[in-house]
Image (cartoon, rainbow, N blue to C red):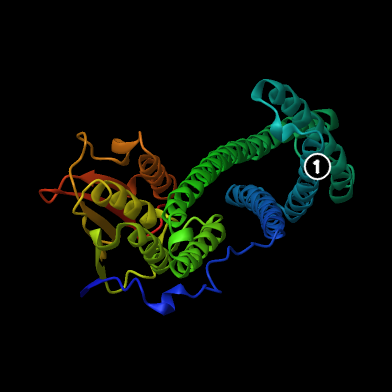
């Protein structure tokens, strides 16, 4: 359901300063620290789970194979379980040494020889730590045909491949973790660059808007003091809004409508009856988020090129509706495009052209390719600036 009405520029209630306004909320600084601590605890729990699960599965598999071949005795099961518990402890010490020396940040060429040597040493340590188990459970007698020396080297060789598999899994995980961190760092750099670019664009929009609005005030100071005071009040509303919304990416569309009413009131002081405005605002659009000063930039462009250049003036139509999951804003003014164009860059050589170009870039920074700002010569004899803003955040 749409409403069509002319703006009441002399309504006294619209002259009162707005005490509320949009105020950027400050996120707590310790939120990032809490997130990092939670992530660290999650990684530690994952490490413990993998350690216990991996060594436990290895122990059960080893005992299971012995049971299938009917060669597993109670002593064998006790030795395998206790020995693998020692193996888990040695792998934990191995992990601590690797972390302290920064092995997880090394490239393959530097990591591989260190890992091989660590596997050999860990296997030897594991074998030495397990040796008393054989003495306890077998009373110093070695089962089977192996001698003590052969059993020692067999245990070391067996441990090398076990720790080799452990090392491969551990360091491959950290390689992928490092790649993920690099991707996050790259995304953060990109986001920082976009934020810096967005702030630069905002710094161009606000002074530009203020400069054009002051032109409407200058002629009134000596001619009509009451209207000048009224204009100062409206300009103060716009300046306050500009300052408060400068740190926000989006603001409610209703706030934009109020500021545009103030802007048009200032412009009508200069253009008088030559400036006529018709609103076609659908229900449910006032709470939609839009970039600050977007609508004001479109209307300013319409006034400058559709009203100021025509002796008879004309009517500006401001419409907004939600269709197909997007907020669609249109501002139509009489006139023709100076050159064929479908983007805001068509009038980049003028002050409002800069504003339109910046508005288009801000939309791309905030919403990506889902948002668009276009200028079209339609209907015949009119120019329409149309904006599409997706209501759902981009992935």
The answer to whether residue 281 of the structure is visible from this angle is yes
Quadrant occupied by the N terminus:
bottom left
User: Residue 376 location in percent, x, y?
Assistant: 19, 45
* Residue 369 figure quarter: top left
Q: Residue furthest left?
A: 380
- Above/below status of 347 relative to 48: above
Residue at 67% across / 20% down in the picture? 109
User: For this rendering, which residue is in front, 113 or 24?
Assistant: 24
In what element is the residue under mark 1? helix
Q: Residue furthest top?
A: 109
The answer to whether residue 317 of the structure is visible from this angle is no
Label count reads 1
- Above/below status of 255 relative to 107: below
Q: Residue furthest front?
A: 223
User: For this rendering, which residue is in front, 363 or 85?
Assistant: 363
Residue under label 1: 96
* Residue 45 figure quarter: bottom right
* Residue 277 figure quarter: bottom left
Q: Is residue 83 left or right of residue 354?
A: right
Residue at 70% across / 26% down in the picture? 111
User: Residue 278 location in percent, x, y?
Assistant: 23, 66
Q: Is residue 298 left or right of residue 249?
A: left
User: Residue 107 location in percent, x, y?
Assistant: 66, 25
- Above/below status of 277 relative to 358: below
- Above/below status of 385 relative to 179: below
User: For this rendering, which residue is in front, 133 or 336?
Assistant: 336
User: Residue 294 location in percent, x, y?
Assistant: 39, 54
Q: Please rate how many residues cluster around mark 1, counting C-alpha atoms within 10 Å: few if below 14, some from 14 to 19, many from 20.
A: few
């Amino acid at each position: 359901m749409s409403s069509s009405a002319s703006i009441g520029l002399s309504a006294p209630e619209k002259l009162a300063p707005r005490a509320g306004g949009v105020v950027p909320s400050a996120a707590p600084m310790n939120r990032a620290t809490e997130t990092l601590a939670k992530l660290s605890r999650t990684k530690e729990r994952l490490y413990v789970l993998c350690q216990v699960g991996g060594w436990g599965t290895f122990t059960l598999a080893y005992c299971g194979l012995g049971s299938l071949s009917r060669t597993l005795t109670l002593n064998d099961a006790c030795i395998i379980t206790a020995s693998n518990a020692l193996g888990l402890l040695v792998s934990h010490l191995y992990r601590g040494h690797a972390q302290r020396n920064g092995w997880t940040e090394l490239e393959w060429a530097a990591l591989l020889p260190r890992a091989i040597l660590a596997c050999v040493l860990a296997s030897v340590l594991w074998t030495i730590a397990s040796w008393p188990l054989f003495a306890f459970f077998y009373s110093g007698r070695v089962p089977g045909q192996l001698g003590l020396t052969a059993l020692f080297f067999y245990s070391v060789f067996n441990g090398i491949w076990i720790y080799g598999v452990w090392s491969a899994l551990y360091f491959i995980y950290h390689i992928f973790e490092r790649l993920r961190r690099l991707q996050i760092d790259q995304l953060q750099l990109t986001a920082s660059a976009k934020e810096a670019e967005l702030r630069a664009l905002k710094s161009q929009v606000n002074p530009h808007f203020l400069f054009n609005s002051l032109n409407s005030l200058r002629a009134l100071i000596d001619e009509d003091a009451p209207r000048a005071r009224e204009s100062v009040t409206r300009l103060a509303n716009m300046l306050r809004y500009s300052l408060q919304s400068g740190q926000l990416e989006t603001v409610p569309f209703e706030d934009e409508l109020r500021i545009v009413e103030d802007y048009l009131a200032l412009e009508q002081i200069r253009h008088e009856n030559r400036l006529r405005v018709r609103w076609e605002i659908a229900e449910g659009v006032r709470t939609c988020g839009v970039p600050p000063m977007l609508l004001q930039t479109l209307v300013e462009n319409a006034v400058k090129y559709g009203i100021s250049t025509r002796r008879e003036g004309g009517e500006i139509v401001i419409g907004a509706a939600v269709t197909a999951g997007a907020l669609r804003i249109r501002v139509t003014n009489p006139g023709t495009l100076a050159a064929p164009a479908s983007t805001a860059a068509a009038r980049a050589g003028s002050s409002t052209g800069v504003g339109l170009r910046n508005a288009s870039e801000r939309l791309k920074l905030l919403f990506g390719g889902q948002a668009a700002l276009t200028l079209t010569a339609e209907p015949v004899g009119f120019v329409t600036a149309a904006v599409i803003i997706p209501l759902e955040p981009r992935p």
